[in-house]
Image (cartoon, rainbow, N blue to C red):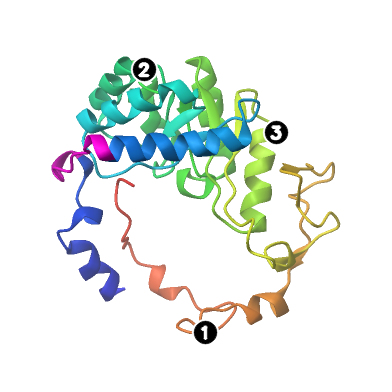
Amino acid sequence: LDQFYWRNREYDVTNTMHPFTGVQITEIGLDYLEQYVADVRKIIGYKIPLATDHFGFMGVEELIKVARRLEKFNLAWMEDCIPWQYTDQWKRLSEATATPLCVGEDQYLAESFLPLLRAGAVSVVHPDPLTLGGIYETKKLGDMAQYFGVRMALHMAEGPVGAMAAATIGAATENFIAMEYHANDVPWWNDMVICADNPIIKNGFIDIPDRPGLGIDDYNDEVLAEHVDPRQPGVWPSTDEWDDEWCRDRFFN
């Protein structure tokens, strides 16, 4: 834990909040981003939604430049552009572009979204159920966002259990539109668990079980043991170090 503590005390671009980095994007940089998105859009066409992940570490003025450049590609959203606490800056960005804005993977508790929702500063909330506070808290946020006319997508960079929890929330939430998924290139991702319906994700979709629970019977310890980080041996190591109030998380992404 000490190494994480000291690493996060370093003053560098990845540990400095976006408004304070002084990073500016040039016309060459804007041209590069525009061409990158154009290449992707050319491949997938306009029948498939296209969203952008975190831009990061630029101030609101630079993000306005980016958002305006990318409007022509009809993006589903631009994600986590500014630290979520800066409601006024989100509002300023949203008023400067027609591109929908999305925020939320770092936020804890549904109530933390209220300033953004009340300000009409975002078009999509994007919580991670494991970070936000669990299944009920995420469902509560979805209903709250619906009241304000805002859609909900779900951040999901976890294993199969987290995926099934997120999918179940989405299926029960009327304004849910999509779930993020990172493990498409991990061949043993589905094998981490034992369940009747495996593979879990088929052609980009998850079938929600019609029986109690999340549809997963158990973890597959043999598969987990094959892929344990050698720096942290053991499939089920002790978690005693987390019993105290201590956290290395930042309040922004």
Q: How many marks?
A: 3
Residue 179: which quarter of the image? top right
Image coords of residue 176 (percent x, y): 61, 28
Secondary structure category for the residue under label 2 = helix
| Residue 124: x %, y % from top left | 48, 27
Cα distance in 3D space between marks 2 and 1? 46 Å
Q: Find disc 3 in the rendering and name its residue.
A: 171
Q: 151 or 248: nearer the eye?
A: 151
Indicate the amino acid at tag 3: Ala
Q: Residue at x 35, y 20 (%)?
A: 121
Where does residue 61 sit, x and y in percent of width and height?
Answer: 20, 28
Magenta stretch holds residue 49? no
Q: Is residue 211 above or below residue 158?
A: above
Q: Which residue position holds label 1?
A: 233
Residue receiving disc 2:
118
Q: Which residues are magenta?
A: 19-28
Precedes in sequence: disc 3 or disc 2: 2
Where disc 1 sits, the SS reads loop
Question: Would residue 80 be seen by someone viewing this image from the given angle?
Answer: no
Q: Residue at 37% x, 38% y: name it.
A: 33
Q: Amino acid at mark 1?
A: Pro
